[in-house]
Amino acid sequence: MHNETLNVWSHLAAGVLVVLRFSVFAVTRGGGLVGLTLNGSDGLGLYLDLSCLPLVYYFLSALTYLSSSAAAHLLQSHSELAHYSLFFLDYLGVAVYQYGCALALYFYSSEPHWRRSGVGEVFLPAAALLAWLSCACCCFAKLSYRRPYPLHRKLCQVMPTGLAYLLDISPVANRLANSTWGDNPVMLLHALQVLLFLLAAFFFSCPVPECFFPGRCDLIGHGHQVFHFLVSLCTLTQQEAVFEDFLSRRASLMREHGEWRLLLATVSFPVLVLCSALTAVVMRKQVERRLIKEDR
């Protein structure tokens, strides 16, 4: 039992719940493996429903950020190099999750009039850029600053992540502002996931409640633990909302978006993962060189 124990278990347990819930949904309501069947329309070979790909990417991105966060908080104290490497992995997971959310919310949760707006037109490339920038800035801040941390370290971490969230949640915010909630129960899930994330952002940014009870929240109750629980609840709530939107719009997805947009999303997601991973690897090389220089 130590000050990272609940940080590990909160995201590890959430990851298990995400896998179980997605598996149940895929089998009972998603059509087998969410669109992947053994026989196509001609009765031969494998058939992949492209309308399911954003949902699969969303699931993989959620699992990536939860597992990488649990690994970072569990193993980062083994050495100084492990500390930096695993938190770089954590930031990579956050970037992947940001873009996975962007894809799911764009294809399943956005309204046609929003997609025709200026924000909607540039949404996917801007979301990919901000997700990569979030990973790069967090890695840079981790590499460049040591305790006592200056304020601009926190700003370097929070600002690109905050901008990415404001963009990623914009289709949901537009829908919440322009729809009648009583007509669609999924709106309550979207409102709840926004509220949970804003609360999580507060506890991530502020040392509450430990600033009021010095020394009493070291093992249980400090702000980062509260942040972990809130963001886990946000992910589980968001997943339910995405499932409902997927079911309601799956039949018309190809007609509304076109095959080329879905194919572009198929390519853009692994490209974002690769670029963010390369950024984390480069930052790790910088850490290795610095540690060797300090040892000498």
Image (cartoon, rainbow, N blue to C red):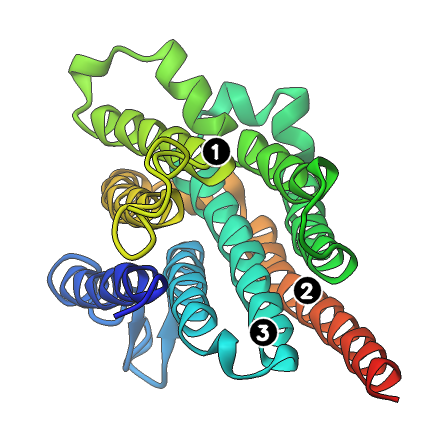
Determine contact: label 1, label 3, CB under 8 Å. Answer: no
Q: Residue at x 59, y 80 (%)?
A: 82
Q: Which tag, 1 or 3, sits closer to the chain's start?
A: 3
Q: Amino acid at mark 1?
A: Cys
Q: Check disc 3 and report the residue beneath it.
A: 83
> Distance of mark 1 from mark 3, alpha carbons?
22 Å
Point out the tag, 2 or 1, that comes first from the N-terminus: 1
Q: In the current view of this chain or complex, which residue is farthest to the left?
A: 28
Q: Is residue 128 above or below residue 2?
A: above
Mark number for residue 276? 2
**In the rendered image, which residue does mark 1 sit on?**
206
Please say if the residues under marks 2 and 1 sit with CB atoms less than 8 Å apart: no
Front in this rendered view, residue 174 or 151: 151
Question: Residue visible at 15% across and 67% down?
Answer: 27
* Residue at 26%, 65% in the rendered image: 9
Query: Residue 168: x percent and y percent?
Result: 53, 36
